[in-house]
Amino acid sequence: MATAKPAREVNTANVNQIPIAIIGATGYTGMELVRLLSFHPGVSIVALTSRQQAGEKYGILNHTLEELDVPKIAKKVKGVFLCLPHHEAMNTAQEFRSWGVKVIDLSADFRLKKVETYEKWYGKHTQKKLIQEAVYGLPELHRAEIASAKLVAAPGCYATTNILALTPLLAEKMILPHDIISDSKSGVTGAGRSAQVDSLFSEVNDSFKAYKIASHRHTPEMEQELSIVAGEEVTLLFSPHLVPMDRGILSTIYARPTRKWTTAQLLKAYKKFYKNEKFIKILPEGSWPATKQVRGTNNCLISVLYDARTERIVITAALDNLTKGASGQAVQCFNLMFGFAEEMALTQTALIP
Ligand SMILES: NC(=O)c1ccc[n+]([C@@H]2O[C@H](COP(=O)([O-])OP(=O)(O)OC[C@H]3O[C@@H](n4cnc5c(N)ncnc54)[C@H](OP(=O)(O)O)[C@@H]3O)[C@@H](O)[C@H]2O)c1
């Protein structure tokens, strides 16, 4: 009888590999990190944590989930990915930083530069000093700062889509900064893996709904980053929607032009702005992105149109909320922080169908 192949060993670090830990490894972003980092030749996963499944084997990996014990893990790793809910991440980030470990936090805890803005949208912040040390982890805007950062705040999934979609037009002053409407639709994994009535199959399947219109928590980080790009205050009306699919975000954004443009002029601005970006794909005139085209990839597809009849610019952008919207982007930041090629472990093509 053939003997079974031994499970893949993940906890013996090669000298050339960076030992890392994933904190909150049983959630959707944690599992996506394991998937992506399994392709990364420069990484050794040495710890995966979970409170509820501590002691259990982790999927196909020869690794046992463990409780979060910061001193024990910090002694073994150089970098950690925090895949915890907001509020849970901030103190854990501080503890790892006190051990000199570089932190990539996927929660919202260090994305907002103004403490009062964080506290208005999320509640009390207990690690205020660390906020200024954190770099907003969108490589297309903050590449050099991320490369030297010790603490990176990976952006939200909706935020990544909308910031990438609007940046070239605001940078080139082609749209008015106070008349922007984003109508964004997300798959259900955007809400995380914990049991909630709103995410049940019978609530979500065969339905399509808007939620948190003009009050979603990604609004302040989008306005923060877009205001930096524009050099003036940007306000955005943000309308999120829930779509009965697992992964993906599609945003349709409406903006007023600063003067009459042609679609060709707008496309030229996007191509110029993103000419060296490997993960941003500008679609030809008349093509519109679909979430299936980005599933499991770190790409963001963008299309733009000037509608002369209504004097509006319409931008459409698609990405995978778990990849470019979360874990893929976190790996992109990790690569910059540890001196790897930025696209390492991130060159997968879309999983179709
Ligand atoms: N889902 C997305 O598309 C997405 C995109 C961008 C950013 N994010 C952000 O990334 C972070 C992780 O998101 P996710 O979707 O992976 O969440 P999730 O699926 O709910 O997973 C959360 C993970 O954290 C652990 N955990 C530890 N303490 C916890 C606590 N007090 N409450 C709940 N879970 C706790 C959970 O395992 P145990 O309960 O066993 O400890 C689990 O492994 C969040 O801050 C989220 O906002 C998510």
Image: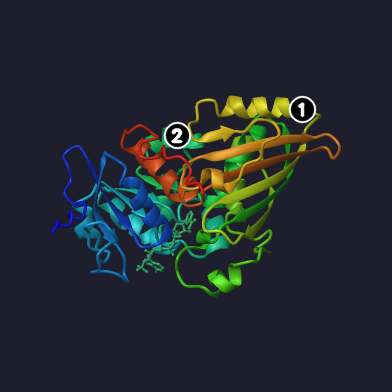
Where residue 137 sits in the image (x, y, percent)? 45, 43
> Residue at position x 50%, y 30% from top?
277
Which amino acid is tagged 1?
Thr
Instruction: Judge whether 79 appears above or below 127 on screen.
Output: above
Which residue matches tag 1?
A: 262
Rounded to the nearest angstrom, the CA distance separating label 1 from label 2 is: 31 Å
The image quadrant of residue 289 is: top right
Quadrant of the snapshot with the N terminus: bottom left
Where residue 110 sits in the image (x, y, percent)? 45, 52
Which amino acid is tagged 2?
Arg
> Residue at position x 27%, y 58% from top?
60
Kind of element beneath mark 1: loop
Ligand 1's quadrant is bottom left
Kind of element beneath mark 2: helix
Which residue matches tag 2?
A: 143
The image quadrant of residue 340 is: top left
